[in-house]
Amino acid sequence: MTDEFGMLRENAEEAGLPWSGPPPVRRTAHDTASGRTVSALHWGSGPPRLVFLHGGGQNAHTWDTVLLALGVPALALDLPGHGHSSWRPDRDYSPSANAAELAPVIRREAPDAAAVVGMSLGGLTTIALVGTAPELVRRAVIIDVTPSTGLRVASMTTEQRGTTALTRGPAEFDTLEEMIDRAVAAAPRRPPSSLRRGVIHNTRRTPEGRWAWRYDRPAGPVADFSPLWDHVSAASVPLTLVRGGDSTFVADADAEEFARRSRSAIVHVVAGAGHAVQSDQPRALAEIIRDAAGL
């Protein structure tokens, strides 16, 4: 595909959003002190008012419909090892390692953003940023994850994991359609057109002509992220937790713990959404983000 933004009109039409022509969005690359590169999508022509961090096995395009709905300047980053960002030789894509790599980029490109929005691994990375670079996070919106999620995932079924289960499946396929079929089977609530776009953005051709996911795989099993609870407890900025109403990644007890540790926290439950709230209910999520960020 020559124009990675050529499907945005389909995003808008699928969500019932008005379309007056292609929005101003461009891809940029940012060198880091490690010698690696962080790739990003810059939306709008002004300084970013929001920063977006996607989940594991995703990329910055997961926010396309949400950003079309918001219509504000924003910076959507590809996490290390994802999208067009560099892969790490040590395959350490933990929240703390991600935060250390991304903080200098956010400091250069979006130092005055009103909020950082993170989903799943991106949400845990946002929590790590709250603890290690609080000057960059004036408000945080954490989507369908808490520091307890890592331990919870270990007991979840493949069906409950949805498309996140694909990250533990085959890494390469003979055809693109085979990958799309797997994504559709893993997320039956979502329109096949949406899943097709997601797979196109999240795949690459190998030198042998096969199709592979556009992300690296972390070393080892799903980690225990519970030490991040200390950052939630120490946070001095407003935190918003958004849960998918049909998701099992955040239990009632986890949400209660989040609210107990952060007395200013607000918890939203989005009906009709699974783990990927941004994909299942993008317009509802956009309004939550707008309110949480004070836009």
Image (spheres, grey):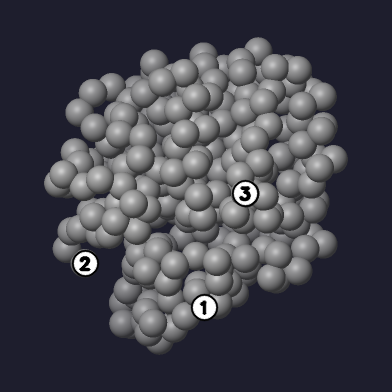
Q: Residue at x 31, y 82 (%)?
A: 209
N-term mark: 1 or 2: 2
The residue wearing badge 3 is 271
Q: Say which element carries label 2.
A: loop
Looking at marks 1 and 3 on the same chain, the residue that comes earlier in the sequence is marked by 1
Name the amino acid type tagged 2: Met
The spot of residue 162 in percent (x, y) is 62, 65
Q: Nearer the viewer, residue 67 or 18?
A: 18
Secondary-structure class at tag 1: helix
Q: Nearer the viewer, residue 58 or 291?
A: 291
How far apart are the two marked residues, 1 and 3, measured between alpha carbons? 25 Å
Q: Which quarter of the image is occupied by the N terminus?
A: bottom left
* In the displayed structure image, the side of residue 33 where residue 135 appears, left or right: right
Where, quadrant-wise, is the C terminus in this rendering?
top left
Provide the residue designation for mark 2. 1
- Say left or right for 271 vs 230: left
On screen, 206 above or below 28? Answer: below
Give x and y (percent) for residue 55: 54, 49
Total marks in image: 3
Residue pictured at 76% horizontal, 30% vertical: 258
Callout 3 amino acid: Ala
Name the residue that disc number 1 marks.
182
The image shows residue 177, relative to residue 262, as above or below, that is below
Residue shown at 61% from the left, 44% from the top: 270
Residue lying furthest bottom: 174
Q: CA distance from mark 1 to mark 2?
A: 21 Å
Viewer-closest of 193 and 150: 193
Q: Looking at the image, is mark 3 or mark 2 earlier in the sequence?
A: 2
Q: Nearer the viewer, mark 1 or mark 2?
A: 1
- Of discs 1 and 3, which sits in the foreground? 3
**Can you see residue 92?**
no
- Label 3 to label 2: alpha-carbon separation: 34 Å
